[in-house]
Every structure is written in C-alpha cells, then in structure tokens.
Image (spheres, grey):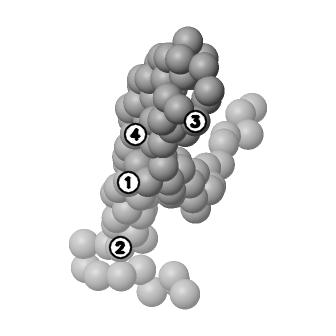
Amino acid sequence: MSEGFRVDLGALEKAAEGVNATLNDLKEKKVSDLDGDQGDFGHEQLAETVSDFCDRWELGIEHLAKDGQEVAFRLSKSVQNYMEIDAALKGHLDGILERHSGRDPGVH
C-alpha cells in the first residue's frame, strides 16, 4: 500500500525566493568589477589574463543566472499548480457531503 507523499509548499516558495535573491545579488556585483585597470597589475600580460578570465567567468555566471531563473520559475509554478489542484479537490470533496436537498444533517 502506498504511503503517498507530502509537499512542503512553503519550502518550495522559500527556495524560489532564495534563488531570486541570489540572482539579484549577481546583478548588483559583476565579475568585471574585479579585474581593475591594467596598471594595477604591474604586468601587461597578467592584466590581460585576469581580464580574459573575468570575461569568461562573467559569461559563465550569466548562463548560471539563466538556469537559476528557470529553476525559480518552475518552483513557483509548482507551488501554484499544487494550490490549484488542492482547491479543485477540496471543491470536489465538499460536494460529496451534500445531498440534492441540501447539506447532510449528519455532518458536523
């Protein structure tokens, strides 16, 4: 016999909020802010290497952010879907306790 399963909708929503908060933090602080001016490194080739690394790192962050947006959307959508299904099932079950002539008098 199946025990079924339970979904913590609050935890799903908090997870989506956490992903969105992280994405907002990433928007405020760019990796490109780390590389600085060439003169700061004291060596032209080192400055170019750091700049190239930061550019590639920023591109990777952008890809991760897009994936994160999709994760947050799907978590929020899952919460919405569960709530819609719960509401529909509640409406269906509420109807079981009613007769054509009105509410069942034996129900408290």
Look at the numbered disc 3 and give the secondary structure of its residue. Answer: helix
Q: Residue 42 carries which label?
A: none
Determine the CA span between mark 2 and mark 3. 78 Å
> Relative to 104, does residue 97 appear above or below in the rendering?
above
Labels 2 and 4 touching (C-beta < 8 A): no
Residue where numbered disc 2 is placed:
98
Q: Which of marks 1 and 2 is nearer the N terminus?
A: 1
| Cα separation between marks 1 and 2 | 28 Å
**x and y, in percent, of residue 45 in the image:** 55, 12
Q: In which quarter of the image is the C terminus?
A: bottom right
Q: Nearer the viewer, mark 3 or mark 4?
A: 3
Disc 2/disc 4 C-alpha distance (Å): 44 Å
Residue 94 placement (x, y as % from top left): 39, 69
Three-letter amino acid code at disc 4?
Gln
| Alpha-carbon span between mark 1 and mark 3 | 51 Å
The answer to whether the residue labelled 2 contacts the one labelled 3, judged by CB atoms less than 8 Å apart, is: no
**Front in this rendered view, residue 99 or 74:** 74
Q: Name the residue under label 4.
A: 69
Instruction: Between residue 39 and residue 30, name the one nearer to us.
Output: 39
